[in-house]
Amino acid sequence: MLLNKKIAFIGGGNMAEAIISGLIEKKVVDPCRIFVSEKRLERCEYLQKFGIYCESDDCFGFLKDADIVILAVKPQNFDDAAKTLTDLQPGTLFISILAGVRIAKIEQAVGTSIRVVRVMPNTPALVGEGMAGISAGTSATQDDIIITKYIFDQLGKSVVVEERMLDLLTGVSGSGPAYVFYCIEAMCDAAVTLGMSESQAELLVVQTFKGAVELILKSGDKPSVLRQKVTSKGGTTEQGIAVLDKHNLKKIFFDAIDAATKKSIELSNNG
Ligand SMILES: NC(=O)c1ccc[n+]([C@@H]2O[C@H](COP(=O)([O-])OP(=O)(O)OC[C@H]3O[C@@H](n4cnc5c(N)ncnc54)[C@H](OP(=O)(O)O)[C@@H]3O)[C@@H](O)[C@H]2O)c1
């Protein structure tokens, strides 16, 4: 699907690298058809290890030539990057992964002849276990969505949603890895305070998270069913869960996701 396509990236940071390495590892794109415009010379040199073409100054040539352009700069660099977007060839598929930059703003910068798709990925994409939300711009076609989904499915999983859902998706899967890291951190801290060594605590907790997730995926059971299965009456787990209930864990997560979603809306409105 992508083998004959020329793909250009604007910004060659962490996310661009995750996408590039995912596509090359899965052999779905020829590295010599990937072009990156990256401001930092040392980053350019680093990215060349993938066998791709990376340029730190002039990117107009290859942007004009690209079938797909992926914008991967920080949101605050959007206005600066937008200056290079006025010369895109009509018919280019333009994918933005910028958090908090709405489709309408992107379409205004690239012009009406460019088909825009907005994507919200997350950091586990760096290890091929990402979760991305994809939203179609005004003139994006079904094929554009299929191609975008194909790209992000190489880095994990993806769902297609209306743009208005991207703020909530940001609060759930965009910020989600940090909530998981925080839970792991909290469980490790508790184990250490109660007498375990740091390395053992980390091994136990991380493997427990990994094992629990694998069990959900492989059993096909809902998390609530699996939780009930391991919570025997009068047992140890029941005691632990009772404490989590007393502190209203579900409400804590509701508030966290709600706050992150509201912040995403605020950033998008001010962006
Ligand atoms: N990381 C995540 O988990 C995550 C999750 C979801 C969405 N995103 C989105 O992904 C985007 C990229 O994030 P990232 O973590 O990959 O950022 P990053 O590591 O900072 O990479 C961006 C790179 O682009 C360079 N750059 C800035 N303006 C440029 C321009 N006009 N032309 C060419 N290169 C330019 C930057 O150089 P300078 O540093 O010199 O500016 C930097 O090296 C962000 O918009 C973010 O919202 C990231």
Image: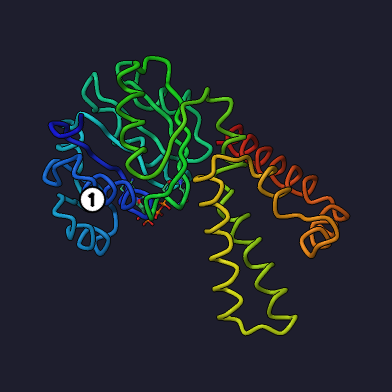
- Front-lying residue, 103 or 169: 169
Residue 69 place in picture, x, y as percent: 27, 34
* Rendering quarter of residue 157: top left
Q: Which residue occupies 46% across, 52% down?
A: 123
- What type is the residue that disc 1 sits on? Glu
- Front-lying residue, 255 or 53: 255
Count of numbered tags: 1
| Secondary structure state at the residue bearing disc 1 | helix
Residue 33 place in picture, x, y as percent: 13, 40
**Residue at image mark 1:** 25
Residue 141 place in picture, x, y as percent: 34, 16
Give the vertical position of 30 relative to 187 (above or below): above
- Front-lying residue, 113 or 228: 228
* Rendering quarter of residue 232: bottom right
Residue 230 place in picture, x, y as percent: 70, 55
Give the vertical position of 238 relative to 155 (above or below): below
Q: Which residue occupies 29% across, 54% down?
A: 39
Residue 17 falls left or right of residue 220: left
Residue 33 falls left or right of residue 117: left
